[in-house]
Amino acid sequence: MKILITGGAGFLGQCLAHALQENELKQIVTELVLADIAPLRDATLLADARVRSVTGDLQRLLADGVINGVDGVFHLAAAVSGECEADLDVGLHANLDSTRALLDACRTLKQPPRVVFSSSLAVYGGDMPEVIADNTLPMPQNSYGTQKFVCEQLIADYTRRGHLDGRSVRLPTVTVRPGKPNKAASGFMSGIIREPLAGVDAICPVDPQTGVWITSPRFAVAGLIAAFETPLQQWGGRTALNLPGLSVRIADMLAALERRAGARVAARVRVEQDETISRIVGGWPWRFDTARARVLGLSGPASIDDLVAEYIADYPNAVIHAA
Amino acid sequence: MKILITGGAGFLGQCLAHALQENELKQIVTELVLADIAPLRDATLLADARVRSVTGDLQRLLADGVINGVDGVFHLAAAVSGECEADLDVGLHANLDSTRALLDACRTLKQPPRVVFSSSLAVYGGDMPEVIADNTLPMPQNSYGTQKFVCEQLIADYTRRGHLDGRSVRLPTVTVRPGKPNKAASGFMSGIIREPLAGVDAICPVDPQTGVWITSPRFAVAGLIAAFETPLQQWGGRTALNLPGLSVRIADMLAALERRAGARVAARVRVEQDETISRIVGGWPWRFDTARARVLGLSGPASIDDLVAEYIADYPNAVIHAA
């Protein structure tokens, strides 16, 4: 089976590629194509003979035939929320037009491929119920969420028409991410844990009482793989699936950091509110009833302490303070 | 005020143009541009010095500057449901890409124009509640409905960003339409009234017990104009508004025809089920709670008899049988 991961050199794409190398799918994955605008630098992945890395704008890569012979796609490539809010055209190109190009490329394949699309909690906003249910009407309040929701609709329609077997999964904010901050409005949720653990100051740009809906990289990847592996009749419906996560306040995250690394490390986080980020993140829901996902056996981290522990376990070299 | 109607030579576009000539807006409409892929043939409209008719693909007309100086847009141009289901690319071009082009053209204007978008009950489908409410999650089950729903989202986002003041209105099936049948899956709902009244046989392609959600041309136009005129704070939210209509079974329509024109006229309708049309139309909801529209003072025809009477009053020359 040949698998294409768009955004394959991104953080989640690399996590997913590693998981595909290691988990039960490894028996059937004969070729793993990682397509990304940025070059892949992960040595383990590059050393795997099954892995091929291709670099460039997705629409160009598709025009060059990157889809040929593909049996399954994980479509993770996207401009992030902050970029999309700053420049509408950037988001429309990277998120909407590139997804259209991918779906149309799938139509050229003899066998409709399975396509897992990573959507986002950012589809929700506006006048929402206290708790988001699987059938809550999304009313996106940012361009990123709009574009994700639009792609969900197109994927559902292409699936209905038999061009592909699409499954859209709405991810909670995936945190703690390693490396440098990105332009996602949610990026600080990783920063406020990652930077202090590395002995670096961090800024929290929202009121610490802000509630957020998060999951860890491992659980996000498990959700994407489950979306790929679940038989269609069990998956049910063509509406996007809300992945389980944790409902926490930013203050809870800081408290977990303090429990794990001590008060002096936690004190490295300074609150300095940013209006745009507060508006975007504060407009996202943070309480979900993920009944449909739970029936499929999906879950999220048991606690924020587990989430911090996962980061420390997975990126020990990035951590100098973990009591 | 300069108004652009896309689909302006179509049935609803012409009804709307006539209404703008006649209703309270006539004082402020200084120029009315009717853009359509087909030429305008309506003598009354062509004779009005304020009316300009432009013919061609909407994307080309936009590239040629049809948006210049426009204060308000009624965006009605669309490929209909039957066409969209028969050819995905036709629908994506006419409905999605043309709307994108229109919205991007609006971004070039100094003053964000008001844009009324005619969406459709076809956004709904799949696993629905008995009665559709304003916050029911659309799960389109046909490409036309998908494309309409996608455009609603883009319009909401462009509105949020301040590029336009968009209002999306989901129309019930508009019937009785005069003239020739079109490729809409719902077209027969006009045909089964129009053809017998003209002494012509008609085919009903669905089970007469099928429930449908309909309104008349006059009420549809009134809804579009109200969407244009309602102050933003009263309009509320950026979600599409479900226009009021009538919940009837096809058999009720045939009974109304018989009440108005007699049993021999009604007997001109022969049931001959078509699988595709039955699937599309049978998948649409037909019971709505249009609370938000009612608060705005919008309504639909009081009865199916009124709807038949409106057609006979408005198109007397097309009617030879109306006892």
Image (cartoon, coloured by chain):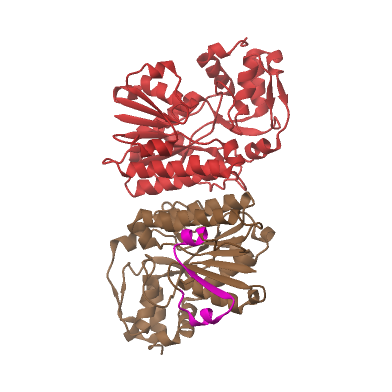
Chain colours: A brown, B red
Q: Residue at x 43, y 75 (%)?
A: A177
Give the vertical position of A16 relative to B67 (above or below): below
Q: Nearer the viewer, residue A321 or A114?
A: A114
Residue A150 appears in view: yes
- B168 relative to B262 in the view: left or right: left
**Residue B120 image offset from top left, x and y in percent:** 52, 37
Write down the quadrant of residue A235 in the picture.
bottom right
Decide if residue A135 is in sight here. no
Q: Which residues are magenta?
A: A40-63
Q: In the rendered view, would you say A92 is above or below B129?
A: below
**Residue A297 place in picture, x, y as percent:** 63, 68
Residue toward you, B67 or B194: B67
Tell which residue pokes out farthest to the front in this image: A64
For image coordinates 65% across by 17% down, the residue present is: B196
Please identify the quadrant where the C terminus of chain A is shown: bottom left
Please indicate whether residue A254 sits to the left or right of residue A69 in the image: left
In this rendering, would B100 be left or right of B131? left
Name the residue: 71% across, 15% down: B263
Q: Quick check: B260 above or below B273?
A: above
Q: Position of residue B102 (x, y in %)?
A: 39, 41
Observer-nearest residue: A61 or B285?
A: A61
